[in-house]
Image (cartoon, rainbow, N blue to C red):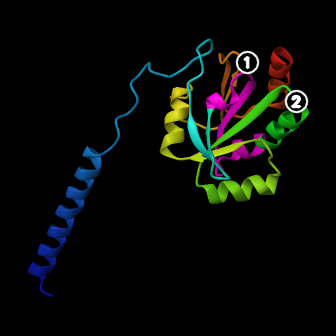
């Protein structure tokens, strides 16, 4: 190849790259509006409908009348991985008064492997973009993980926590609501 051919090839490649970036930029999702954070403490809990690991559809309404601790997490999230045994303990210790629900922003395969490895027995739901929308509706406009919400028996959000829940925080919370 001569210099002129190489220059033309580089120019076409650069124009193609710029066009691709432009298309990606125009097709990007809009950022959430500032100030719209979804449900907050005192609000009625939003609904959700996500698939479980056994292929069943599960909605928030399936747990009406129960004290619910809803935890958004992912297998690749280190704080999520650390707090899940704590949530499992709470689920087992208070099975007659509390339902813990894990909602994973992940693919079913890695979630199933992780849940089996840790021996998690509370309901685990999975999804991707749909779970991201759910967690925004439940008050996590930042989209960070883990994110945990307590809903009372009347369906009212009573506590929201962004970040890893400690044993002390969970113990105090459950003492107040059980």
Tell me if residue 33 comes above or below residue 85 in the rendering.
Answer: above
Is 159 drawn above or below residue 51 in the view shown? above
Left or right of 93 on screen, residue 68:
left
Give the quarter of the image for residue 47: top right
Classify mark 2: helix, strand or loop.
loop
Residue 116 percent across, percent down from the top left: 78, 56
Crowd class of label 2 (few under 14; some 14 to 19; many from 20; radius 10 Å)? few
Q: Is residue 69 above or below residue 43?
A: below
Identify the residue under disc 2.
94
Q: Give the range drawn in magenta.
A: 60-83
Residue at horizontal 58 percent and vertical 55 percent from the top: 107
Quadrant in the rendering for residue 73: top right
- Per the rendering, the mark at residue 153 is 1
**Rendering quarter of residue 169:** top right
Question: Hey, which residue is sitting farthest top in the picture?
Answer: 42
- In the foreground, 67 or 78: 67
Mark 1 secondary-structure assignment: loop
User: Is residue 97 one of those drawn in magenta?
Assistant: no
Look at 72% across and 21% down and name the residue there.
Answer: 65
| Side of 140 where 171 appears, left or right | right
The tally of labels here is 2
């Amino acid at each position: 190849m001569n210099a002129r051919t190489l220059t033309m090839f580089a120019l076409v490649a650069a124009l193609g790259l710029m066009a691709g970036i432009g298309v990606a930029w125009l097709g990007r999702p809009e950022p959430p509006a500032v100030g719209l954070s979804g449900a907050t403490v005192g609000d009625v809990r939003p609904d959700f409908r996500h698939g479980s690991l056994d292929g069943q559809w599960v909605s928030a309404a399936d747990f009406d009348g129960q004290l619910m601790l809803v935890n958004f997490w992912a297998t690749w999230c280190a704080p999520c991985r650390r707090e899940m045994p704590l949530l499992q303990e709470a689920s087992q210790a208070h099975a007659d008064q509390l339902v813990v629900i894990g909602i994973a922003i992940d693919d079913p395969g890695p979630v199933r492997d992780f849940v089996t490895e840790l021996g998690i027995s509370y309901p685990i739901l999975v999804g991707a973009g749909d779970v991201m929308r759910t967690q925004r509706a439940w008050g996590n406009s930042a989209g960070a993980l883990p994110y945990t919400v307590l809903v009372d028996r009347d369906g009212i959000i009573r506590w929201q926590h962004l970040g890893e829940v400690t044993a002390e925080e969970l113990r105090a919370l459950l003492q107040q609501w059980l």
